Every structure is written in structure tokens, then in C-alpha cells.
């Protein structure tokens, strides 16, 4: 399955990427590029990946999350995952990353 990424924003000046499809080896570049572009803008305070419509996530996808979290940290911006699908949540839990990147609401 292909990967679609639609950019939105939230009230806290964070870029929200609505991700649909498979996050894997074949789609890693698409998500990485979109995330880097969003984090590179001066008017963005952080990045949220909304994963509610992600049907598949493998270790390559987790690697993309790690890379984007590092880009955010280097730029002193926030990084979080929102609304992971059940399948994605299980993968993140197995990897021990579910809580680390969970979106914190004020």
C-alpha cells in the first residue's frame, strides 16, 4: 500500500502530518521528507504524526520516527505521535516506544 501524507496544523503552532497507508522501506523517504520540511520552517514549534490511518509499520518506519525525533530535538522543537492505530500501537509497545513519543495534552 502507498503512503499519503497531508499536512495540517494545530493551535499550538505544531505541524500535524496525517499519515495514511504503510510506513515501511518503500515509503520512508516520503514521510522523512515531509517531516523534515515541516520541522525546517521557522513558524513551526513541533511535529505531530497522526497515525490513525496507518495500516502497517515495520522497523524501517520506526527508524523514520527516530530520525524525525532527532531532527526535532536538534531544532529544539517537540515531536509526538498521535492516535496510533491498534496495529501501530502494538508495534510501538513491543519496541518500547509507545510512551516515549505519546502526545502529551496540556
Image (cartoon, helix red, strand yellow):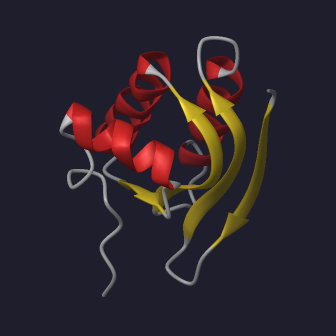
Query: Along the line of sight, which residue is nearer the eye, 58 or 35?
Result: 58
**Residue at x-position 31% and y-position 37%:** 74
The N terminus lies in which quarter of the figure?
top right
Whether residue 87 is situated above or below residue 32 in the rendered picture = below
Residue 67: x and y in percent read: 40, 26
For residue 12, above or below residue 50:
below
- Residue 47 is left or right of residue 97, and the answer is right
Task: Locate residue 11 relative to residue 74 in the image: left or right.
Answer: right
User: Relative to 40, is 33 on the left or the right?
Assistant: right
Nearer to us in this view, 4 or 52: 52
**In what quadrant of the picture does the C terminus appear?**
bottom left
Q: Which one is in front, 99 or 74?
A: 99
In percent of width and height, residue 87 lies at 49, 44
Q: Report x, y in % for residue 86.
A: 47, 54
Q: Residue at x 66, y 19 (%)?
A: 29
Q: Which residue appears at 36% of the width and 36% of the height? A: 91
Rendering quarter of residue 62: top left
Count how many numbered circles sit on residues in the image.
Answer: 0
Compared with 54, 106 (above or below) is below
Q: In x, y percent, where is residue 7?
A: 74, 56
Left or right of 59, for residue 95: left
15 up-or-down from 33: above or below: below
Amino acid at each position: 500500500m502507498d503512503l499519503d501524507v497531508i499536512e495540517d496544523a494545530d493551535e499550538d503552532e505544531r505541524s500535524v502530518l496525517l499519515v495514511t497507508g504503510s510506513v515501511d522501506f518503500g515509503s520512508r523517504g516520503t514521510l522523512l521528507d515531509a517531516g523534515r520540511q515541516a520541522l525546517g520552517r521557522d513558524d513551526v514549534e513541533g511535529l505531530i504524526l497522526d497515525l490513525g490511518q496507518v495500516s502497517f509499520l515495520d522497523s524501517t518506519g520506526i527508524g523514520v520516527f527516530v530520525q524525525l525525533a532527532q531532527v526535532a530535538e536538534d531544532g529544539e522543537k517537540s515531536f509526538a505521535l498521535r492516535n496510533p492505530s491498534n496495529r501501530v500501537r502494538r508495534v510501538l509497545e513491543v519496541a518500547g516506544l509507545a510512551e516515549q513519543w505519546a502526545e502529551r495534552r496540556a
